[in-house]
Image (cartoon, rainbow, N blue to C red):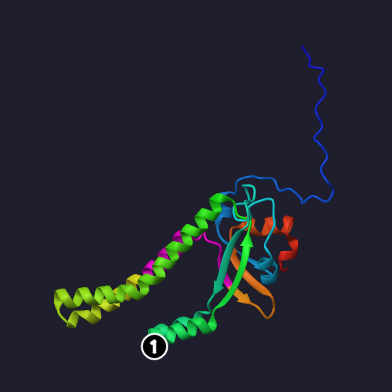
Amino acid sequence: MISTDEPVSPSPTSSTALPHLDLAPPSPEERSPVGVVLRPSRLEQGLHTRTCPQCGLNPAGAPVKRTFQWVPPWVYFGLLLNIVILMILYYAGRRIVKGELPLCSDCDVADRRGRRLRSFSVAGIFLGPLVFAGLGGVTLGSEAAAAGALIGLVSGIVGIVASHRRTRFDVIGVKHIDRKRDTMTLTASPTFGRVLAAEAPDALLG
């Protein structure tokens, strides 16, 4: 028996509606973080998209507040001097942008969890030398304290590298911020730039 039902036409959409992306899961090759160049001033106003830019799959959730911070690499030379100078260089060199992202709940949770893990690993580079030096001094004598401090420092550096690698697919990172030129570069999933290009193109540079 042949059906005589006519196919139902989709309801028309507004000509002013944002373009809709095909929500397809990213391939494993597309999981590698890429650079996305944005306008900090536009990010501070809040990005408004229908699709979560981080996963490119789920509908966007309510905007979540994020503070993006970039510190130039030369700041960490302060480690070779002492903690006080490091902190002075840190606060003198850092750049901050406070904005809003329309992340879905899954990407929001993953990003927050990754940021916490990275913060703990940074604390480890300061606490590690103290803990290992104390253990070395108590168990093997004062001569072992210096060796323990060195071991703690190396362990802290390894912890930072490991935490960044483990969370590289989850955390929306910052590669650079230039407030004078109103430009910043984020490290995010490849879908991040594609979603913004389709649904918030005025936020992108280049």
Magenta region: 158-175
Q: Residue furthest right?
A: 15
Relative to 141, 61 lies left or right: right
**Residue under numbered circle 1:** 81
Q: Is residue 150 above or below residue 44?
A: below
Residue shown at the point (62%, 51%) measured from the top left: 61
Q: Is residue 92 above or below residue 119?
A: below
Relative to 81, 182 lies left or right: right
Percent across and percent down for residue 186 are: 60, 67
Residue shown at the point (54%, 82%) measured from the top left: 93
Q: Secondary structure at mark 1?
A: loop
Find residue 97 and report its image quarter.
bottom right
Q: Is residue 88 above or below residue 134?
A: below
Mark 1, other Cα within 10 Å: few <14 / some 14–19 / many ≥20: few
Q: Residue furthest top?
A: 1
Kind of residue at badge 1: Leu
Percent across and percent down for residue 11 are: 81, 36
Residue shown at the point (17%, 82%) measured from the top left: 142
Percent across and percent down for residue 168 are: 50, 61
Relative to 197, 123 lies left or right: left
Number of numbered discs visible in the structure rendering = 1
Residue shown at the point (79%, 49%) measured from the top left: 17
Q: Nearer the viewer, residue 164 or 91?
A: 91
On whether residue 165 falls in the magenta region, the answer is yes
